[in-house]
Amino acid sequence: MDNYQQYSQHGFVGQQNQAQSNLSPYILHNLKQTATWMRVISVILFVLTAIVFLFAIFIIAAGSGTRRIGVGSSISSAVGILYILLAVIIYLIPGILLMIHANSLSNFSVTNSLIDLDNAVSKGKSYWTYIGVLALIVTIIFFIGIIIAIAAAS
């Protein structure tokens, strides 16, 4: 929304804030259907988050039941906390960002307003930026793991 106002102040957009896009009804319909599937994926990500949370709690609880001097309990607690952290990073945050993008896309498909289009594209950019950074980090960790495995095997 702020981007639209900045562009309109600098003359990049020659219409008023309530300007309508020139997209066809077919495109708006497809955007609305896309938003529906984005919501489905978001819900799947939320369910996966809940499953991993439950699994992590089970690991933590199972570790606390060990009668050792705390070594087993500490390790299982660390693993459980790591699973929760990974669930938040890999499932929950992308699910939230995707749901926000889907809602803004649906809003645009109803209003056909350029402000709502700007908001939808901005939310999409946030989602894809997060996914891109996450993919880069996972790829780097993967290659570091390969290098460590090759060095350990030598």
Image (cartoon, rainbow, N blue to C red):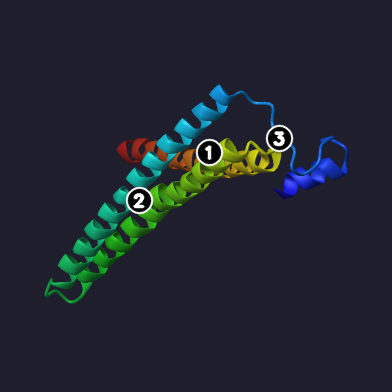
Mark 1 vs 2: CB contact within 8 A: no
**Mark identifier at residue 132:** 1
Q: Of tags 2 and 3, which is closer to the observer?
A: 3
Q: Secondary structure at mark 1?
A: helix
Cα–Cα gap, marks 2 and 3: 34 Å
Q: Of tags 1 and 2, which is closer to the observer?
A: 2
Instruction: Give whichever of 48, 4 is nearer the camera.
Output: 4
- 118 relative to 69 in the view: left or right: right
Cα–Cα gap, marks 1 and 3: 31 Å
In the figure, residue 104 lies in which quadrant?
top right
Q: Which residue is mark 2?
A: 46
Neighbours of disc 3 within 10 Å: few (<14), some (14-19), many (20+): some
Q: Give the image location of residue 147, x and y in percent.
A: 41, 37
Q: Earlier in the sequence, mark 1 or mark 2?
A: 2
- 114 relative to 40 in the view: left or right: right
Instruction: Give whichever of 154, 77 is nearer the camera.
Output: 77
Cα–Cα gap, marks 1 and 2: 20 Å
Instruction: Give whichever of 154, 88 is nearer the camera.
Output: 88
Q: Amino acid at mark 1?
A: Gly
- 52 relative to 24 in the view: left or right: left
Q: Residue at x 41, y 35 (%)?
A: 37
Whether residue 129 can be seen here: no
Q: Residue at x 47, y 37 (%)?
A: 35
Q: Amino acid at mark 3?
A: Gln
Neighbours of disc 2 within 10 Å: few (<14), some (14-19), many (20+): many
Q: Which residue is mark 3?
A: 20
Q: Earlier in the sequence, mark 1 or mark 3?
A: 3
